[in-house]
Image: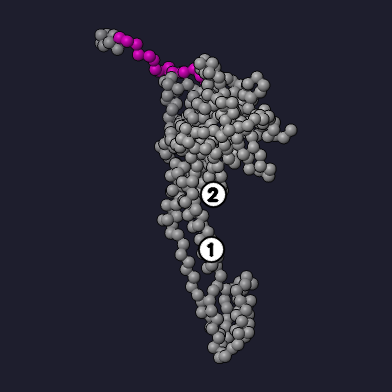
């Protein structure tokens, strides 16, 4: 049994005639995402890397300690918790629709979570239920059909379709411009890297063979790597006239604007990419790009993994990533004052420093030179005076 059969074996056994699912907007729910190739762009990959890395720092929490352990250490046979979140975020950004297959045992217990690396998907219907048919691009093209109930789904640019988000075709023109610009620079360097010019012979009435022979001899003697001095000599009957090559290339300002278009598309900037962002910039980045995504993943996994009865008893899955992680060291050290006054527990402060919790660190503490102000106490002191 292959690995794919082992993971998807249960759903692969379905033998039925499916009909194509019709969405509310009248769309045929067949989706081939533009953007599979955008991850080959070094600029796109630079934009996605901080999104994936900062997302992967989140800590899973759950009312079910087994699920919390699973999500933290080994969501599936391939990935630890950090890799799982990073791959989920990359698939979400590149394909705009993320599917996570929830693997269950015979008793319905969740035993694995797999981000689905599909080439395309199609929504289908059977016996009143919704199924997703995934096509995987490999040496042997194969398909798998998975019930909607076993898929956690997240979408980006969610507008026209019911099942998934829109594709990344809006980015196509900018990436094509960047690619064309890069090729133009390469060709410009190649075209000006060699000495180019004309050899003028003052001898009269040379035939074509003699002219070609003089040119070839000049190239052999002076336009090779062996001519390390970079100096050529000619006899009085020859004159070399250089041709100046100045190919037009895109200006720095135009190239910067192309990059900024991609930055805006993914909501990042140079400081985020180069890890030079200030505390305020990182807090804004967390609030706009990390926290909303983690909330969406928490809601979707909670809904698909737990039954309605379990959710009534407040079973949940949550991914925590405190914005205090992005504070400067100066700000983190200043938080000690909050610990002294009982506003934070020692372990909450240690978490901001990436320190392990200590025994008894979950209880608030207070400095001995501070005490609770009791009602009427100040008035009593004034009366004594």
- In this rendering, would 280 be left or right of 350? left
Q: Is residue 207 above or below residue 132?
A: below
In magenta stretch: residue 380: no
Q: Secondary structure at mark 1?
A: helix
Residue neighbourhood size for the residue with mark 2, other residues' Cα within 10 Å, grouped as few (<14), some (14–19), many (≥20): few
In magenta stretch: residue 362: yes
Using the image as rendered, state which of residue 182 and residue 81 is in the foreground: 182
Give the residue displayed 39% in from the left and 15% down from the top.
371
Q: Give the residues drawn in magenta, as a range.
A: 359-376
Residue to which mark 1 is pinned: 187
Quarter where residue 333 is shown:
top left
Main secondary structure along the magenta-highlighted residues: loop
| Quarter placement of the N terminus | top right
Q: Is residue 326 above or below residue 341?
A: below
At which x and y percent is residue 145?
62, 32
Chosen colour scheme:
one colour
Give the residue displayed 42% in from the left and 56% down from the top.
254
- In this rendering, would 252 be left or right of 48? left
Q: Secondary structure at mark 2?
A: loop
At which x and y percent is residue 198?
53, 79
Numbered mark located on residue 371 in the image: none
Give the residue displayed 25% in from the left and 8% down from the top.
383
Using the image as rendered, state which of residue 103 and residue 34 is in the foreground: 34
Residue to which mark 2 is pinned: 41
At which x and y percent is residue 127?
59, 26
């Amino acid at each position: 049994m292959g690995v794919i059969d082992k993971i998807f074996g249960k759903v692969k056994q379905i033998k039925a005639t499916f009909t194509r699912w019709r969405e509310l907007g009248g769309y045929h729910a067949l989706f081939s995402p533009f953007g599979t190739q955008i991850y080959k762009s070094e600029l796109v990959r630079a934009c996605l890397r901080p999104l994936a890395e900062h997302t992967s720092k989140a800590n899973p929490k759950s009312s079910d300690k087994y699920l919390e352990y699973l999500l933290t250490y080994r969501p599936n046979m391939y990935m630890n918790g950090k890799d799982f979140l990073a791959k989920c975020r990359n698939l979400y950004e590149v394909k705009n629709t993320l599917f996570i297959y929830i693997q269950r045992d015979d008793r319905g217990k969740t035993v694995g979570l797999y981000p689905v690396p599909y080439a395309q998907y199609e929504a289908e219907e059977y016996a009143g239920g919704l199924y997703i048919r995934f096509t995987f691009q490999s040496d042997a093209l194969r398909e798998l059909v998975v019930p909607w109930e076993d898929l956690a789904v997240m979408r980006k640019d969610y507008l026209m379709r019911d099942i998934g988000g829109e594709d990344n075709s809006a980015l196509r023109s900018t990436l094509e411009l960047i690619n064309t610009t890069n090729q133009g620079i390469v060709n410009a360097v190649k075209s000006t890297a060699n000495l180019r010019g004309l050899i003028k012979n003052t001898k009269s009435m040379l035939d074509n063979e003699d002219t070609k022979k003089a040119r070839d001899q000049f190239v052999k003697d002076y336009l090779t790597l062996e001519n390390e001095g970079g100096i050529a000599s000619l006899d009085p009957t020859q004159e070399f006239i250089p041709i100046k090559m100045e190919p037009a290339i895109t200006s720095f300002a135009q190239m910067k604007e192309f990059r900024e278009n991609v930055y805006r598309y993914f909501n990042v900037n140079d400081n985020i990419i180069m890890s030079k962002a200030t505390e305020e910039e990182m807090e804004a980045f967390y609030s706009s790009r990390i926290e909303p995504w983690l909330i969406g993943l928490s809601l979707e996994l909670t809904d698909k993994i737990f039954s309605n009865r379990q959710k009534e008893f407040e079973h949940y899955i949550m991914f925590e990533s405190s914005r205090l992680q992005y504070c400067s060291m100066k700000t983190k050290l200043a938080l000690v004052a909050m610990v002294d006054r009982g506003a934070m527990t020692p372990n909450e402060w240690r978490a901001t420093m990436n320190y392990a919790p200590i025994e008894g660190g979950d209880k608030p503490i207070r400095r001995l030179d501070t005490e609770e102000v009791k009602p009427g106490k100040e008035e009593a002191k004034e009366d004594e005076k």
